[in-house]
Amino acid sequence: MHPRDALFGADEALPVTLPVCDHYAGVEALMKKSLQLQAELGPVFDVTLDNEDGAPVGGEIEQAHLIAELLAGPLNRHGRVGVRLLPVAHPLFEAVATAVLRSAVKPAYLMLPKPQGLAEVQRAAQALDTLGGAAVPLHALVETHGALREVFAIAAHPRIESLSFGLMDFVSAHRGAIALGAMGAAGQFAHPLIVRAKLEIAAACHASAKVPSHCVVTELKDTQALQAAAEKACRLFGYTRMWSIHPAQIRPIVDAFAPTTAEVDQAIEIITAAQAAHWAPIRHRDTLHDRASYRYFWQLIERAHRTSFHGGPQLPAELHQAWFQGAA
């Protein structure tokens, strides 16, 4: 029996799995460069084409048509290109969404920025369904007080696949009460209000089997700061995905979110032994393991698979074929 079939009941929501890096681009040249890089490296990271902050004021419709062309173009080889829309309260929300959804190739997901709470997520979902986007998963940015207050309800919404933390807008929403340093790579892990928000988002996502996506690091050329932030997000805060805002950030994020070779080797030993035991409890190196820990090790193997395109630990060929044949 395949691990997913054995470890997750038929009435239980399977955890959503996405590439560990979500790379944002809004300027035409950078959007094309990002798509080219994804085409070369494989779907180890998603590309999100930005129709909100990345679009010039007054040029949102033109940006939407450009994004529609890029979605249907030859650089979208892996089908892992999403789009950040305008806020649902914006007067051009439906016009932009319509232009994007008319593309010959639908986006992999649509990002909803700045919802004030569950009601706006519901409103956006209903509008997008009417416009032909019912089959497109939705992501949302938690960057307002209202969204954070209702984050568990938002994560539970059936159209939501992932929630991201909007660090900079969240800090700004405190009207100067949070110092500028909290927007930095180190400060965002020290300020209690930011830490609280990150933990709430991660907990809400895991409660509903959705993907928590960690916020940006704005120090574009400080690889050590980015690496440290990515490792904390993954190892300490429970995030399984993270934003990139510069191509140089993609590799460190993927590396930080990839399990180590030793972790993968241990997981393979335990899962193969569990399969041989028909998922009954086993003793491995004098430690008891059962279905509870099997889930942990299987999800670690899935994470290894999602990062192996870019140099992460490789699975043995026979196990890759048995467990992931035909998987992206």
Image: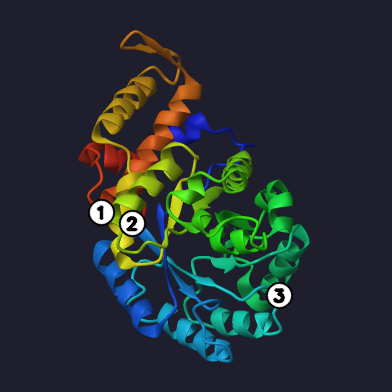
Callout 1 touching callout 2 (CB < 8 Å): yes
Amino acid type at circle 1 is: His
Res. 118 image quadrant = bottom right
Element at label 3: helix
> What is the quadrant of the N terminus in the image?
top left
* Cα–Cα gap, marks 3 and 1: 38 Å
* Cα–Cα gap, marks 1 and 2: 6 Å
Viewer can see residue 74 = no
State the image coordinates of residue 250 (x, y, percent, origin top left).
32, 59
Residue named by callout 2: 44
Tell me the residue at 40%/52% (across/down): 20
Residue named by callout 1: 310
**Sequence-first tag of 2 and 3:** 2
Tell me the residue at 62%/47% (across/down): 193
How many marks can you see?
3
Amino acid type at circle 3 is: Thr
Residues packed near mark 3 inside 10 Å, few (<14), some (14 to 19) or many (20 plus)? few
State the image coordinates of residue 245 (x, y, percent, origin top left).
40, 66
> Compared to 78, does 103 lie above or below?
below
**Sequence-first tag of 3 and 1:** 3
- The answer to whether 61 appears left or right of 119 in the picture is left
Residue named by callout 3: 130
- The answer to whether 111 appears left or right of 266 in the picture is right
